[in-house]
Amino acid sequence: MKAIQLVKYGKADRAFRITELPVPEPGEGEVLIKVSSFGLNFADVMSRLGLYREAPKTPFVPGYEVVGTVEKSNVASLKEGERVVAFTRFGGYAQYVTAPELAVVPLPERVSGAAGTALATQYCTAWHAAIDMANIREGELVLIHAAAGGVGIALTQIAHMRGATVAGTAGSEEKIRFLKDSNVEYAVNYREKDFVEELPRLTGGRLPDVIFDPVGGKNFSRSRKILAVGGRIVTYGASDQLNHLKNPLAPLKLLFGFGFLHPVGLIMNSKGVLGVNMLKIADHKPEILQKAMQQVVRLAAEGKLIPVVGKEYPATEIAAAHAFLESRKSIGKIVMNWE
Ligand SMILES: NC(=O)c1ccc[n+]([C@@H]2O[C@H](COP(=O)([O-])OP(=O)(O)OC[C@H]3O[C@@H](n4cnc5c(N)ncnc54)[C@H](OP(=O)(O)O)[C@@H]3O)[C@@H](O)[C@H]2O)c1
């Protein structure tokens, strides 16, 4: 089978090798999937830059999700030939991949393969963060950073579904237009306006009850400043690292940027700080991942969640697709298709 290995950290055009590898054998409790599409995630860019601690050593096949058909099944609940979406703990950039039963969900024909790739990682992350962790309630004000990205769009749709009002940040006017078209009530271009001042100005002083932050560092500590009493902030990424790539003190800058918090401060203001790491959830609580996947696939099939596919590429154009995601210009999901 063809597979795409990450062989060298750094720029996308020199990082990958398309190679032949043996088709893997599914173990007990696993299925083998013939992959038609796989998705890109920002964590793939972080891995390529050598910034993702949980990635295997090079060379390895990245990839967190695939859509395809079950080729071999060692589990009773999934049949050969069934169309599925799967969360893969690496290995997704390949024509075949194995996955454990709890990370595979049948994908109804009504959901396109491209849309399906968004459901496994980005929508499950958003679901777990918004529903299991933050428990967004009707009428709350929810601030979503990187709101035009894959997870950001998923969070926006889930927050709207819960009857919340959504505020979002993004880094270009094109994305701000997209957010307004997506019924995001308050959209802030953080390159032009400081969201800490701009959001309360736009809302007439109302502060967010829930904040989702994938940027980390100072963005997290500054977000905390505007969290309402009774609020929850979910931290689930550290893309801020990319702002300091050439600085040898970058890890310290990121760490100190997050700031320090004491539980007494959380008690005094009745606030919660929550962390999300879907790889850890997949490893230690796979039933949470399965439930999230079942919910988002069902809601997508019912047309209640509608993944936005930003761009599709042939799998062989992996370098171009990675460079596009890294450029911070992408809106929604980047999807790769095998011919
Ligand atoms: N913890 C988990 O389990 C988990 C799971 C999935 C994703 N994530 C995290 O969620 C985030 C979004 O992932 P995604 O796959 O949906 O990607 P994405 O949002 O589609 O693309 C990344 C976006 O992040 C913003 N960004 C990139 N670098 C930035 C920087 N240095 N400072 C500020 N903003 C920056 C850019 O948008 P703007 O500049 O326009 O805002 C960019 O378009 C990533 O940080 C990813 O690591 C975490």
Image (cartoon, rainbow, N blue to C red):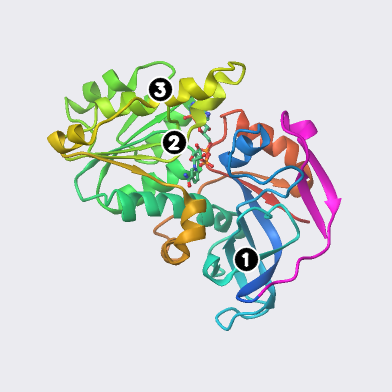
Say whether residue 264 is left or right of residue 301. Answer: left
Q: In the rendering, at what x and y percent does residue 189 appear?
A: 41, 23
Residue 61 lies left or right of residue 310; in this view the side is right
SS class of the residue under badge 3? Answer: helix
Marks 1 and 2, how far apart at CA: 27 Å
Residue 74 location in percent, x, y? Answer: 65, 79
Q: Which residue is mark 3?
A: 257
Task: Identify residue type, mark 1.
Answer: Ala
Quadrant in which the C terminus is drawn: bottom right
**Image height check: is 186 above or below 56?**
above
Residue type at the position of mark 2: Pro
- Residue 99's disc number: 1
Quarter-of-image position of residue 106: bottom right
| Camera-side residue of 213 and 280 | 280
Picture disc at residue 60: none
Identity of the amino acid at label 3?
Gly
Which residue is found at the position 77% from the left and 44% from the top? 59
Q: Nearer the viewer, residue 147 or 100?
A: 100
Q: Position of residue 146 (x, y in %)?
A: 44, 34
The dot on residue 214 is 2
Q: CA distance from mark 3 to mark 1?
A: 37 Å
Q: Is mark 1 within 8 Å of ligand 1?
A: no
Label 3 crowding class (10 Å Cα cut-off): few <14, some 14-19, many 20+?
A: some
Segment colored magenta: 1-27
Position of residue 289 in the picture relative to residue 2 (left or right): left
* Above/below status of 210 relative to 1: above
Q: Is residue 227 above or below residue 230?
A: above
**How many neighbours does mark 2 have within 10 angstroms: few (below 14), some (14-19), or many (20 or more)?**
many
Is ligand 1 within 8 Å of the beta carbon of the residue shown at mark 2? Answer: yes
Q: Which residue is at the front of the view, 234 or 56?
A: 56
